[in-house]
Structure formats: C-alpha cells, structure tokens
Amino acid sequence: MKTAGKVTAALAAAIVVLIVSIAAGSVNLSPGQVLDILLSRLPGGGGAEVDANLASIVWGMRFPRAVLAFLAGAALSASGTVMQSILKNPLASSYTLGVSSGASLLAALVMVTGFSLPVLGTFTLPAAGVLGGLATVVLALAFASRLDGKMENQTVILVGMVFSLFVNAVLTMVTALSREHLQEMVFWQMGSFSGRGWSHAAILFPVVLLSLLALQCFTREMDIM
C-alpha cells in the first residue's frame, strides 16, 4: 500500500507539473484554460469553448515539448539507475563510462563535416549521438576487461573516467578547430526542445517505453551484477 501511495502521489505531482509547465510562457495561461484545451482534444470531449489561437499554442507547441521533456527525464533517470545499480556506486551517471562524451564527440563530427545518411536525413545527428555513446561504453568495458578479468567496479569506473576525459579532450580540440560550428555544438550539448513537435514525441515514446520494459525484464540480472 505504501508503494501504491507513493506512485499515486508521484503521478499526481507529475500531472500538476505538466499543467503548470504548459501554462507558463510568453503567453501566460491559467491551469483551467490548459485543462479546457486538453479536454477539448479528447475523443468526444466537448467542454467549454476554447480560443483557437490558444489551443494552437498549447496543443501544437507547448504540450509536445512538455511530453518530450518528461520522456527525456524518464530515460535519463532510468539510465542513471542502471549505472548506479550495475556499478554499485550512487555517483555513477552517463558521464562515468563516457556515454555523454562519446555522444557529443560523434555528433560534433557530424556537424563539422555535414555528413548525412539519406535514409535518416535530419535524424543522422541524434543517431550519431547514440552510436558515439554506445561505442565509447563498449570500448571502455573491453579495455577494463583486459586490465581486470573480474571486471571489478572500481576498475570499470576508473577506465570509464579515463575514456571520458580522453574523448572530452578530443571534443575540445574539434571545437577549437571548428569555430564556425561552435554555437551549434554548444547548444546541442546543452540540449533544447525548441522547435520540437508531436513527430519527435512519436519517435521517442516507443524507444523509451521499449527500453524501460526491457530493463524491467533484467532487473534481477543487474542486481546480481
């Protein structure tokens, strides 16, 4: 019962935060207006009359960005939990094994070279980020296994930090040599939901959902590790 209560409280808090985040902006709205607009979009939802311009702002711009922020937060929290569980270190994060550094480096190279895959198009950049982060982790783990056959947590963490620092150094060099792309690279590393819509949420949602379900299936194995 205690767990159910905590989950219910967390969901209620998430809904409140979602509504408040949608209401805040250059055009201030009340939570009631946001609820009316969202309810009007539900199947068979009539409700109060809503302003078409406000409805466009809420449903077409703010709501998808808020959903994306929640999905990104869920993915980051889950990845942090996995890192901390496997490495048995409460300070472990995506920076520990060089995930963030590797993703930033390969994404920066794509920006500098202008490389684009015909199949992926505009999604070449995020795909490069995923590939760079994954490649860095694989290399770090492979190197750690060569140094320590038992793969002690301390060894993995130290090797991961070394790889992270090395990749960061290469990224700094690439940034210094490509000043015309400096702003683009910095903004990408900072992260932004500007200009994002439902098409992006439609891509991220199944990825996050399937990843969370897969992690849920391997919780016992990760605890054993």
Image (spheres, rainbow, N blue to C red):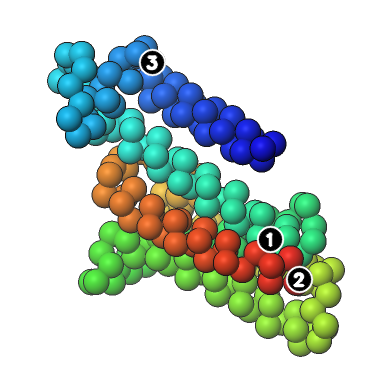
Answer few, some or many: residues within 10 Å of disc 1's Cα (few below 14, many 20 plus, some between 14 and 19).
Answer: many
Q: Is residue 25 above or below residue 186?
A: above
Q: Position of residue 16 (x, y in %)?
A: 48, 24
Q: On residue 31, which mark appears?
A: 3
Q: In this view, does 18 lie above or below 120?
A: above
One can see residue 40 in this view: yes
Using the numbered discs, state the Cα–Cα distance from disc 3 to disc 2 in whole angstroms: 46 Å
Q: Earlier in the sequence, mark 3 or mark 2?
A: 3
Tell me which corner region of the image, top left, top right, bottom left or bottom right, holds residue 46: top left
As helix, strand or loop, the secondary structure at mark 2 comes to helix
In which quadrant is the C terminus drawn?
Answer: bottom right
Q: In this view, does 209 lie to the left or right of 86?
A: left
Q: What residue type is labelled 1?
A: Met
Q: Which amino acid does label 3 sit on?
A: Pro
Answer few, some or many: residues within 10 Å of disc 3's Cα (few below 14, many 20 plus, some between 14 and 19).
Answer: some
Q: Which residue is drawn at 17% across and 30% down?
A: 44
Q: On residue 83, which mark appears?
A: 1
Taking depth in this image into account, of 185 and 118 the one nearest to the observer is 118
Residue identifier under label 2? 224
One can see residue 133 in this view: no
Give the number of the mark in front: 1 or 3: 3
Q: Residue at x 66, y 54 (%)?
A: 81
Q: Is residue 62 above or below residue 177?
A: above
Q: Residue at x 47, y 70 (%)?
A: 131
Tell me which corner region of the image, top left, top right, bottom left or bottom right, holds residue 159: bottom right
